Amino acid sequence: MNNKNYNKNILEKCLPKYLEEDLEKLKEGIKNNVSYLDCLINELQGSINSAFIDGDIIEEQCDYLYKKIY
């Protein structure tokens, strides 16, 4: 993350709707201890990748979200 300190509230703002939804689904899946957690993680990874490649999120957001997953 280029050795910068970013506030998580900033990095989770202005995400594309599909990425916000997939992040929320993963949070709910963790909360409810669902058996298909791996599927939710894979879906979120794909959304992060798409958003970054499309230029909808910056590299710092991409890195932050990946670290948040793992």
Image: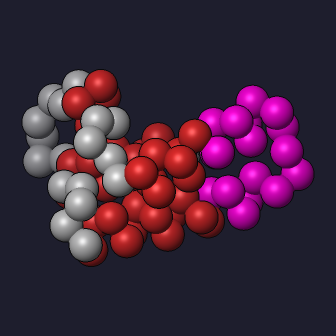
Q: Give the range drawn in magenta.
A: 25-41
Task: Describe residue 53's horizontal placement relative to residue 20 as left or right.
Answer: left
Task: Describe residue 6's horizontal placement relative to residue 18 as left or right.
Answer: left
The answer to whether residue 27 is magenta is yes
Task: From the top left corner, tell me how far across and down residue 20 is, in percent.
Answer: 46, 46
Which quadrant of the view contains residue 42?
Answer: bottom right
Image point (82%, 57%), residue name:
36
Task: From the top left corner, tell me how far across and down residue 68 is, in percent.
Answer: 47, 41
Considering depth in this image, is 38 or 10 the residue closer to the camera? 10
Mark yes or no: residue 52 visible. Answer: yes
Which quadrant of the view contains residue 11?
Answer: top left
Image point (33%, 36%), residue name:
12
Task: Describe residue 62's horizontal placement relative to residue 70 as left or right.
Answer: left
Image point (49%, 69%), residue name:
46
**Is 13 above or below relative to 1?**
above
Task: Describe residue 2's horizontal placement relative to residue 40 as left or right.
Answer: left
The answer to whether residue 39 is magenta is yes
Considering depth in this image, is 69 or 51 the residue closer to the camera? 51
Image point (67%, 57%), residue name:
40
**Is 39 above or below relative to 5?**
below
Instruction: Name the colouring of the figure.
Output: secondary structure
Mark yes or no: residue 63 visible. Answer: no
Considering depth in this image, is 66 or 46 the residue closer to the camera? 46
Considering depth in this image, is 69 or 46 the residue closer to the camera? 46
Task: From the top left corner, tell me how far across and down residue 51 is, in percent.
Answer: 33, 64
Task: Please identify the dominant SS of the magenta region.
Answer: helix
**Is 59 above or below relative to 27?**
below
